[in-house]
Amino acid sequence: MTLAKHPKTLLVIVAEAAIEKKLVRDVRQLGAQGWTLTEVSGAGRGGVREGAWEADRTIELKVICDETVADAIAEHVLAAYAPHYSVAMYFSTVAVLRPERF
Amino acid sequence: MMIDVVVLFFVLGVFARLVKSDLRLPEALYETLSIYLLLAIGLKGGIELSKQPLAALAPQVAACMALGFAIPFVLYPLGRVLRLGAADAAALAAHYGSVSVVTFAVASAALARQGIAHESHAALWVAVMEAPGLVAGILLARWGARRGDTGVGVSGQWSTLAHDVLFGKSVLLLLGGLVIGAVAGEAGTAPIQAVFIDPFKGVLALFLLELGLVAGGRLAELRRFGAAVLVIGLGAPPLLALAGGAVGVALGLSTGGVALLATLAASASYIAAPTAMRIAVPQANAALSITAALGITFPFNIVVGIPLYITLAQRWTAA
């Protein structure tokens, strides 16, 4: 027997911890029902971000939601934060068991 | 021994970083130590605060805030002359307007070691000097943006900033410690002195080891930013110390008090300011400010500056 699975969009936002609160607020306002946040470190075009001091911390925000919601979030993040903050985003399709929760 | 023992821990941290050692303090420990230091400094000041009339402190508080607010207005034009962009100059100026708690702690330790008395409620000055410089820096950034120098507006609302500064961990813990110390007094705090007062210097040494690691990493980045950062990082502290010392003398502070106020004026924030500036002036280069504040000014102050400011204070307050 296989479980019934439902497709959803996973949006991963990697960004400076400085905008953590704003991102979480925006993500909820734009229709996501939940999110997962972890602290990460790495490097990109903006240089190494090793989290050695407070404003240098980096977060990874995962949101599973409908594709339209993910698009709206991504569009907003690009316009509002990408010009001055380090931001990376990517999408993937994931399967969930209880679609009403996302 | 000329150099305070805690400074040697800082040097060890810088050395470890320069030789690419794998030494790294866990993030959680760093956070714990910074919380401890802020609370302990506040508590110590608060216990002394309980012994004196509050009204007498009003002129000191007002003068400290005015000093912190004025500093960025001096440094901003200097940064612009040195060809920094408006946003970078404003953010950098804000770092110097605000203060470094650890520099203050090292200066207090140096005074204690040399047996020079100072106003023991000085932690109150630290608490009130944190925010005004940040506000001034943001005003300067907005002003620069309006003149079209940066090409982009400055984001963020004052209410968010006020919340983040007033209830951010530095001010919250310092003021919280002050209040607890003042309310509980010498007798009330006796049971917790074994944790918060006695081991203070050992904790400070550990924290300085960590700061040495971070500062060492910044030193390697120095080349990226050119002469402006070096000139401000080394030139601003002695200049600002003169201003701080003068305010201290005008307030009629003790020798130690004048030295502490000079140190506070000369110090640059690397905890509250980078975070606040990243939110309020996002187009400014955060690495530039932190390199100047933590990579250059902080080591300069704790190794060369503080002994200098103490000598200055001794000359200025000699009857």
Image: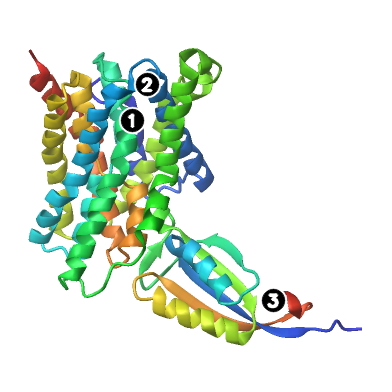
Vertical placement of residue B248 versus A33, above or below: above
Question: Are the numbered discs 1 and 2 placed on the same chain, yes or no?
Answer: yes
Check if mark 1's residue and mark 2's residue have beta carbons within 8 Å.
Answer: yes
Marks counted in the figure total 3
Identity, as a three-letter code, of the amino acid under mark 1 = Leu
Residue at 65 percent across and 72 percent down: it is A33
Secondary element under disc 1, as helix, strand or loop, is: helix
Vertical placement of residue B132 versus B55, above or below: below
On the rendered structure, is A60 left or right of B132? right
What residue sits right under mark 2 in the picture?
A: B49
- The quadrant of the picture occupied by the C terminus of chain B is top left
Check if mark 1's residue and mark 3's residue have beta carbons within 8 Å.
Answer: no
- The quadrant of the picture occupied by the N terminus of chain B is top left
Image x and y of residue B20, in percent: 38, 50
Examine the rendering and report whether any part of residue B266 can be seen.
no
Image x and y of residue A12, in percent: 56, 74
What residue sits right under mark 1 in the picture?
A: B124
Q: Depth check: B313 or B188 in front?
A: B188
Image x and y of residue B198, in percent: 46, 19
Q: Please give the chain letter of the residue carrying mark 1.
A: B
Q: Kindly report the distance in space between the C-alpha atoms of the residues bearing marks 1 and 3.
A: 49 Å
Secondary element under disc 3, as helix, strand or loop, is: loop
Q: Quadrant of residue B275?
A: bottom left
Secondary element under disc 2, as helix, strand or loop, is: helix
Residue A102 shows which numbered tag? 3
Check if mark 3's residue and mark 2's residue have beta carbons within 8 Å.
Answer: no
- Counting other residues with Cα less than 10 Å from the Cα at mark 3, is it few (<14), some (14-19), or many (20 or more)? some
Residue at 41 percent across and 37 percent down: it is B207
From the viewer's perspective, is the residue at label 3 or at label 2 nearer?
A: 2
